[in-house]
Image (spheres, rainbow, N blue to C red):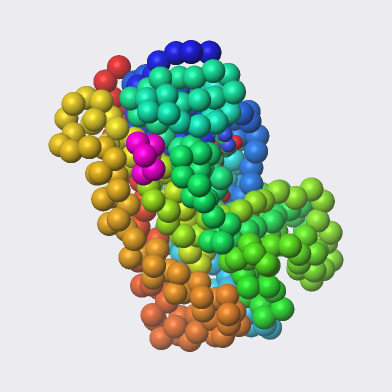
Amino acid sequence: MTRHAEVVIAGASFAGLATALALKGRDVVVLDPKPLGHNPKSANTTPLSTLRALRLLGSVREIHPELVIHFGPQSVHLPSSPAFATVDYQRLCQSLAKQAGIEVRPARALGYQPGRVLTDQGEITCRFAVDASGPAAVLASALQLGYARRRFMAAGLETELPRPPHFPGGLHFYLDNSLPYGYAWAFGSGESVRFGLGVFQAEPYARDLKNGLRHFLNRFDLEPTSTHGGLIPLRLREPVVGEVLVVGDAAGQVLPASAEGIRPALYFGQRLGLLLRQALEGSLEGSAQTLYCQEVQRHRHRFETLEKVQRLLGTAPELSGWLLKMGSGLGITRPFLHGYLRTFVPEHLPSDSIFRH
Ligand SMILES: Cc1cc2nc3c(=O)[nH]c(=O)nc-3n(C[C@H](O)[C@H](O)[C@H](O)COP(=O)(O)OP(=O)(O)OC[C@H]3O[C@@H](n4cnc5c(N)ncnc54)[C@H](O)[C@@H]3O)c2cc1C
């Protein structure tokens, strides 16, 4: 396979597909060795506002209008506006790809040389290369040793089980001093519930995730069946390496404390795609790489604030629960949550007519 494209994107998940969607009508090649949407690794929960903006409501499995934080024997209910939704990952990916009008090429990106993406199926010359390959950041890592350092990675493991009778709605989080430097969750998804356990530092806490998940499920008298999960980069990385633009998990664009990565992956994917579109149309003032770095930099303080919240959650989970409960009583939690949810919402692109074909 030797060919040319305007943009080559490595990775066909949230970040890569959102980038492709914003580039609709341009000559874009998206690469992924895995079949589209067959490789869910997450609880796939994201705010409805994000799904609505990208016309992805068809992938919703269950809507959750509140967060329920359990700590020790107590709990606090926090209404969420907008509500969150658990989604069907495969449907969401298929919908993004269909809207973008792309077919994903079954190929593994291996590296980058100026103007060329190297793959296991040959090379593709291009004007822009985007690395949306998830935590391992294959293109950026091939250019810069140590780019995807394990030191700043969190990890999560999850199992999806048939819904126990009367399992309530809401996104349930468990802050518990017996859990290792992280939190557990249980999110209803229609007929099933996604039970998971996450740790804020993969080293050393991820070594025993399987046992931790089993231990967590004991309280529901359940056993994990098949599991999925992986590493979660919880620290922003350089968004441009050489000429390669890096987005989503590959660029560490995951919100600390919650480990919410879908919303920022879709947001930054869209921002990046729109910048590249302008660059290709010749209407961009400045280089796409510089402007993309500035866009990410504009949000750095949000990531840094959440890192502080994460430190508290990790070291004193039950105290954090108490503080949330007190904050809720005093009316402080709601504006904080509102501010948290207002950011990183992708733009609603009004109609296909804005795209040139
Ligand atoms: C257990 C767990 C639960 C989570 N729950 C949530 C949640 O509920 N809500 C939330 O917002 N976030 C959650 N996250 C985080 C979220 O999953 C990620 O932030 C999100 O998937 C990032 O999207 P992405 O497109 O950047 O990367 P990914 O979803 O990791 O996609 C990367 C893509 O690149 C492909 N790829 C890999 N190597 C190559 C290569 N060499 N060439 C080409 N393609 C390649 C992969 O096959 C994949 O399709 C969770 C994470 C975990 C581990």
| Image x and y of residue 65, in percent | 51, 61
In magenta, the rendered stretch is 240-244
Secondary structure mostly taken by the magenta-highlighted segment of the chain = strand
Q: Residue drawn 34% across and 61% down?
A: 300
Q: Is residue 278 above or below residue 261?
A: above
Is 9 contained in the magenta span?
A: no
| Image x and y of residue 273, in percent | 34, 35
Q: Residue furthest front?
A: 145
Residue in the foreground of this view, choosing between 333 and 146: 146
- Residue 122 location, quadrant: top right
Write down which quadrant ligand 1 falls in.
Answer: top right
Q: Residue drawn 65% across and 34% down?
A: 38
Residue in the foreground of this view, choosing between 349 and 3: 3
Q: Is residue 261 above or below residue 328?
A: above
| Image x and y of residue 158, in percent | 70, 55
- Left or right: residue 32 versus residue 190 is left
Is 243 contained in the magenta span?
A: yes
Q: Is any part of residue 144 visible from this angle?
A: yes
| Image x and y of residue 88, in percent | 60, 41
- Residue 244 location, quadrant: top left
Q: Is any part of residue 169 visible from this angle?
A: no
Q: Residue drawn 61% across and 50% down?
A: 42
Q: Is residue 70 above or below residue 43?
A: below
Residue in the foreground of this view, choosing between 144 and 269: 144
- Left or right: residue 126 versus residue 295 is right
Q: Residue drawn 18% across and 26% down?
A: 282
Q: Residue furthest top?
A: 2
